[in-house]
Structures are given as structure tokens and as C-alpha cells.
Amino acid sequence: MAKQLDYFVHHVYFWLKKPVTRETRKKFENGLKELVTIGTIVGKHLGTPATTDRGVIDSSYSYSLLLTFNSKEDQDVYQTHPTHLKFIDNCEELWEKVVVYDSVSF
């Protein structure tokens, strides 16, 4: 049996301010693409809501960012990294709500 990897998972959901224009999306997507270049990230997924329709699904968000790190310490480096801080400075005016779910393996 393969050993389970002990990743730190950081999942962020963003709700952009309305109206969401093409320019808003472009600026935000470019910011996300730069954000995921931080070296301590070992896995990433940038996404928008899927076209699924079940009662338990919340597709009210605009974008999701899923990052994995080898450890909480690597995620701590990400949190204070200049690229992360630049993303916040450049893009926080675009969102009205952010929800973060962090998890670790058990």
C-alpha cells in the first residue's frame, strides 16, 4: 500500500463584485496565474464553478483557488511572500467576499 502524503491544502473561494466585466476577469485571472508561481506551492488548481446541479453544491462563487503545500510551514511562507501580498494589493478591490478552507491530512 502506498504511503499517504501529508499535504497542507489551502482552498480559497472568491466572489467578485458585480458587475463582473471582461476586464475584471482578465485582471483577476492574470493575478491568480502570477500568484501560483510561488515556489512553495506543490500543486494547484484555478477554477470557476462547474455546471453541476445538485442540492449540496454551492456554485455562487466566481473563482476558486486550490493550493497544496508539503507542510504548514511552506504555506506560511506563501502567506507572507511578496507575490501573494502583491496579489492582494492588486486584486482585493475586485472581490466582495473571500472564504478560505485549510485542511491537513489525518
Image (cartoon, rainbow, N blue to C red):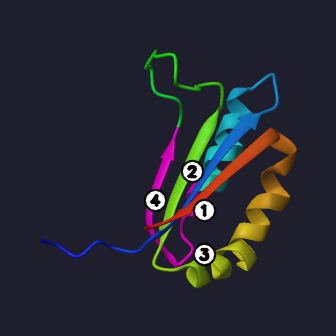
What residue is pinned by disc 1? Answer: 34
> Secondary structure beneath disc 4?
strand
Q: Which badge, 2 or 4, is on the more N-terminal residue? A: 4
| Residue type, numbered disc 4 | Lys
Quadrant position of the C terminus in the picture:
bottom left
Nearer mark to the viewer, of 1 and 3:
3
Q: Which badge, 1 or 2, is on the more N-terminal residue? A: 1
User: What residue sits 71% from the left and 73% below the top?
Assistant: 79
Q: Disc 1 and disc 2: Cα gap in Å?
A: 12 Å
> Secondary structure beneath disc 2?
strand
Q: Which badge, 4 or 3, is on the more N-terminal residue? A: 4
| Residue type, numbered disc 2 | Leu
Residue 83 in the image, given as x and y percentages of width and height: 69, 71
Residue 27 in the image, given as x and y percentages of width and height: 70, 45
Q: Which mark is residue 75?
A: 3
Q: Is residue 105 above or below residue 82?
A: above
Q: Nearer the viewer, residue 60 or 36?
A: 60
Q: Which mark is residue 13?
A: none
Residue 2 is drawn in which quadrant?
Answer: bottom left
> Secondary structure beneath disc 3?
helix
What residue is pinned by disc 4? Answer: 44
| Residue type, numbered disc 3 | Gln
Q: Disc 2 and disc 4: Cα gap in Å?
A: 7 Å
Nearer mark to the viewer, of 1 and 4:
4
Q: Which badge, 1 or 4, is on the more N-terminal residue? A: 1
| Residue type, numbered disc 1 | Glu
Q: Disc 1 and disc 3: Cα gap in Å?
A: 16 Å
Nearer mark to the viewer, of 4 and 3:
3
Residue 15 is drawn in which quadrant?
Answer: top right
* Magenta span of residues: 33-47
